[in-house]
Amino acid sequence: MDVVPYGDNIYIGKIIYSHMNLEILREIGLTKNEIKIFLALLKSGPSSATRIAKEAEVHRSKVYDSLKRIISKGIVHYKVQDNKQIFIANSPEELLTVIKEKREKLDREEEKIKEIIPELHGISNTNKEEQSSNVMKVLRE
C-alpha cells in the first residue's frame, strides 16, 4: 500500500483523504504524521512499527514518537505478540473522546480564569488610577 501525499491530500493505496478530512483531524490536535499513521492502521489493521512506517511512509523514528502521542490521546493501542509491539487503531468514535477531553480541559481553564478575573480587574483599576494621575501631572507641567 503506497501513501502518496498530493498537496494537502493523502493517498493511501487507491483511497484519497481530502484536505477537509485531514483538516478536522488537525483541528482536534493530530499532526500530519499522526493522521497518516492512524489512517494506515485503520486501513491495514494491526501492524508493527516497521510495517506502519512503510505503509504510512513516515520515518520509523518518527513513527514511534507519533504512536506514543496518539496512544496517549486514546485513538491507538498496542498489544505484545511474540515479543513485538503490534499497534491497533481504536474505533474512529474514539476521536469524539479526544474532543470531549479537550472540552473538559477548556472548561477547567475557563473556571480558573473566572477565579482570577477580579484580581486582574484590581490590577487594571490600579493601573488606570496611576495612569490617570500621571496624565494629570503631565498636563499640569
Image (cartoon, rainbow, N blue to C red):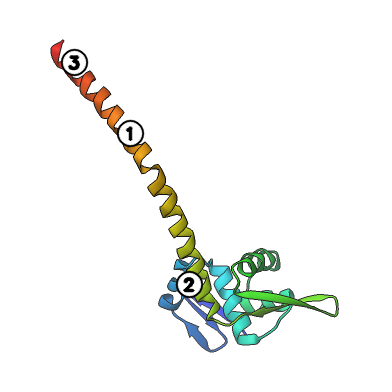
* Amino acid type indicated by mark 2: Leu
* Amino acid type indicated by mark 1: Gly
Q: Nearer the viewer, mark 3 or mark 1?
A: 1
Left or right: residue 23 compared with residue 46: left
Q: Nearer the viewer, mark 2 or mark 1?
A: 1
Residue 93 pos. (x, y %): 52, 81
Q: Residue furthest right?
A: 82
Q: Nearer the viewer, residue 84 or 129?
A: 129
Residue 47 pos. (x, y %): 71, 81
Q: Which mark is residue 138?
A: 3
Which residue position is annotated with label 2? Answer: 25
Q: Which mark is residue 122?
A: 1
Residue 63 pos. (x, y %): 67, 68
Q: Nearer the viewer, residue 31 or 75?
A: 75
* Amino acid type indicated by mark 3: Val
Real-space CA distance between mark 3 and mark 1, rounded to the nearest whole angstrom: 24 Å
Write the residue at 36% across / 43% down: 117
User: Secondary structure under badge 1?
Assistant: helix
Left or right: residue 69 compared with residue 79: left
Q: Can I make out residue 7 in this image?
A: no
Q: Residue furthest bottom?
A: 14
The quarter of the rendered structure image containing the C terminus is top left
